[in-house]
Amino acid sequence: RDMLLPLRLSFPRIDFAAGTDTVEPVGLPLKWINVVRSAEVLPAGREPIVVVAGDLHARKPPAHHGIGALTSRELVIATEPAADGRGTHYGVDLVLVPRHRVRSLAGAGTIVEIGIDAPSGPISLRVAADRTLAEAMTTTLTPLLRTR
């Protein structure tokens, strides 16, 4: 984490206007409020952020439910990890993509697909996510990514 911090802080900032259909972090369950406000999501401290969430209040939360966030520097996906062989899971799986490198964002079922401009050429990153999270990310964050 500490080794990546200078790199993450070097990503160029992209200003954007947040929509009105985003989730306020204070309305999230405590775990996700803490994730959204953490240095893992906001390495430079408080800054504008758009947060979307899937169905976080299900009785038996599915693996990979969580939040998607867009900051001026990064696209973030934070999800519950899949259960291990013993049926337990703990923590958060975190995917961070430099915002200036994101070409596209799409959700298909339980997959969020991120098109990325890599130095070696375009690549595609597929991230497992709850269906409702994939849908919320695609609906809300994709239009914001187009405003560069």
Image (cartoon, rainbow, N blue to C red):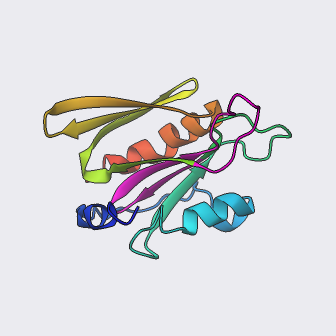
Q: Is residue 23 left or right of residue 73?
A: right
Query: Residue pushed farthest left?
Result: 120
Query: Residue 132: percent from the left, percent from the top?
Result: 64, 35
The part of the image, by quadrant, that contains residue 136 is top right
The stretch in magenta equals 67-92
Q: Residue at x 25, y 46 (%)?
A: 101
In the displayed structure, would residue 72 be above or below residue 131?
below
Query: Residue pushed farthest right?
Result: 59
Query: Residue pushed farthest front?
Result: 86
Q: Is residue 78 magenta?
A: yes
Q: Residue at x 70, y 41 (%)?
A: 89
Query: Residue 112: percent from the left, percent from the top?
Result: 48, 32
Q: Residue at x 65, y 64 (%)?
A: 33
Q: In the depicted view, which residue is nearer to us: 43 or 99? A: 43
In the displayed structure, would residue 98 be above or below residue 108?
below
For the N terminus, the quadrant is bottom left
Number of numbered discs visible in the structure rendering: 0
In the displayed structure, would residue 95 be above or below residue 3?
above
Q: Is residue 44 left or right of residue 65?
A: left
Query: Residue 102: percent from the left, percent from the top?
Result: 29, 43
